[in-house]
Amino acid sequence: MLNACASRLLLTVLGLLPLPALAVPWLVQVRGSHGQALADAVVAVELKGQPSKAPATASAQMAQRDRQFQPYVLVVQTGTPVSFPNFDTVRHHVYSFSAAKKFDLKLYAGTPAEPVVFEKAGVATLGCNIHDKMSAHIVVVDTPLFGKTDAQGQLQLELPAGEHQLKIWHPRLALPQLQSQALSVGSSSGQSSVSLNVGD
């Protein structure tokens, strides 16, 4: 009798089971309308058949430290609970009026008992009712394949071959929605260049 591993290997060799999709390195370069590299641009890639919701174990954090939100841009998958710890010696009142997520954490110190769950894709802009200069963004995406560009405006992902959707957003864009374009990935590494109309 064949054991389970040997049986699966035989079926794969015979072509009865699909081979696992191999991922290839894919570089995304994001620049402004004048060619400048854009750091902190959100990049997400949606694949057909891929789970849009985060696993039950997912979590993220948007901290307040030195009267600033940290990080300035946080990217999470849809359904992720986000905690809002306050490490300052003063209290904060965190809110968002954005369509992607409306919430209000009244004046508090420490960490609220319940995290805020972000169930809808989009961009939630945050503020503090006590400190007007505090602002940040939580970008919610329907894919586990995401990240932010570095100081050179670049992000590398591992992507399988196929026809996908590339989603891009930057804090200096006026629109609260991610921009979308088709992305075709072959069997070898490649790159995509994206230009965003954010001015100088």
Image: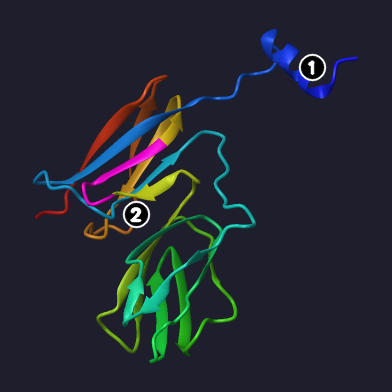
Where are the magenta residues, as a range?
A: 150-157
Q: What residue is rendered at 56% in x and 73% in y?
A: 115
As displayed, is residue 102 above or below residue 1?
A: below
Where is residue 183 drawn, in percent x and y? 36, 31
Q: What residue is rendered at 41% in x and 90% in y?
A: 91
Q: What residue is rendered at 70% in x and 7% in y?
A: 14
Where is residue 74 drawn, in percent x and y? 39, 61
As displayed, is residue 166 above or below residue 2?
A: below
In the rendered image, which residue does mark 2 sit on? 177
Q: Quadrant of the C terminus?
A: bottom left
Q: What residue is rendered at 44% in x and 32% in y?
A: 159
- What amino acid type is highlighted by mark number 2? Gln
**Is 111 placed left or right of 147 in the picture?**
right
Residue situated furthest top in the rendering: 14
Residue 110 sits inside the magenta stretch = no
Assess disc 1: are there few (<14), some (14-19) or many (≥20) residues with their C-alpha within 10 Å of its C-alpha. few
In the rendered image, which residue does mark 1 sit on? 7
Residue 155 sits inside the magenta stretch = yes
The quadrant in which residue 186 appears is top left
- What amino acid type is highlighted by mark number 1? Ser
The quadrant in which residue 94 appears is bottom left
